Amino acid sequence: MTIVRPDERKESRIYLIAWTAVFVLAALRIAIVCIAGGEEAIDFVSIFQTWMMLLPFLLLFCIHNFFIAPQLVYNKRTWLYVVLTVLLLASFFSYFLLFYSGPNPELIPPEPDGRMSGPPPGGTRGRPMSPSTMRAFLGVFLLAANLGIKFLFSEQRERERVQRLEKENLAYQLEYLRYQINPHFFMNTLNNIHALVDIDPEMAKVCIIELSKMMRHILYDSDKPTIPLSDELDFLDNYISLMRIRYPDDASIDYSRPVVAGTAEVPPLVFASFVENAFKHGMGSAESFVCLSVAEDNGKVIFKCVNSRKGAAAGGSKGIGLQNIRRRLELLYGSSYTLHIEENPDLYDVLLVIPSKPIPNDTSNSSRR
């Protein structure tokens, strides 16, 4: 069974409406002339003869539209299209030369008042174009218009196909990146809990409870492109509580967030990779610190993370998690996000500004420094 796409039905409707209008207007013209001339009845014979004159144009259009134009538009067979079009036009012109040129009054449609049309007074000088030339021009124009419309719909279908593939590819990439985040994140978190098992078993139990809350968030929310900012902040609360237990005396941990989050949405775990890298690469000395803040301002979500560094080992931006987050930001926000990372021997500073809603169709280069 042949499946007709919606755009093909739309194209066919355009042709049907156009040709119906041509035949109706031709009949209306004759009817108006008859009424204006005081005729007692509409000359249906003239209407029929006019329609018979239009039928070759309709046949020319149908053959070109359904059989010849697809050879160029869809199959890209340029030479075959040229040959078939030349043959079609030659047949079309031959038909009119054979049946409508020469003194054969029975084959030439009369005027609505019954008079036969003839040359204008003064010979042919007052006529801008002969009937044969006019028919040839109309035939070529008809095929050109048909080909142009077909190319227009073909390009539209191609754009829609590319957009559909890009959308599917975006979904697959985001899914792949989410699957990368979860194992990587849990690996680091479990390592932190493992360090507590021998030092403080009771505290390790508390950490496991906090981890279970985080797992619930990942299991139920990480398969979505975006989640409410409040859910992501709750996740950060649990993670930072876990880190406060892990580093009770070794570091200063400063964390600020909105008391009540608005309607903003963010990708799941969008801040987690920055935060875990801050603790992973920033802790270890007596003067270690991590400063985190999340805020909303004028349709933007602003995330800041500043942490101390453990010397040359703090290559946070080169981790799998941060590479992953960069790609996710590009896919979701395109050029509408800002990621600024500043590194020096003692400090690692991250500023991330994203719209409160994702912009999935913008795939241009993002603003990164």
Image (cartoon, helix red, strand yellow):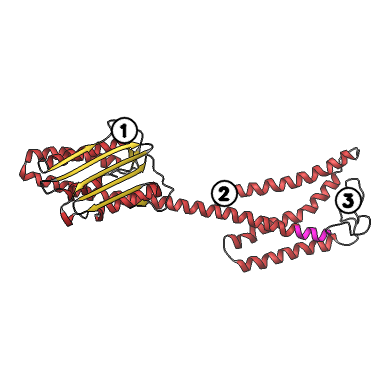
| 3D distance between C-alphas at marks 2 and 1 | 44 Å
Q: Earlier in the sequence, mark 2 or mark 3?
A: 2
- Side (left or right) of 94 relative to 328: right
Residue 327 against residue 220 in the figure, above or below: below
> Which mark is drawn over residue 261?
1
Q: Residue at x 35, y 43 (%)?
A: 354
- Side (left or right) of 180 relative to 210: right
User: Within 10 angstroms of label 1, few (less than 14), some, or many (20 or more) residues?
Assistant: some
Question: In the rendered structure, which segment of residues is drawn in magenta?
Answer: 129-137
| 3D distance between C-alphas at marks 2 and 3 | 41 Å
Q: Mark 1 and mark 2 in contact (Cβ < 8 Å)?
A: no
Label 1 residue SS: loop
- Side (left or right) of 18 relative to 322: right
Q: Type of residue at label 1?
A: Ala
- Side (left or right) of 364 relative to 262: right
Residue for badge 3: 110
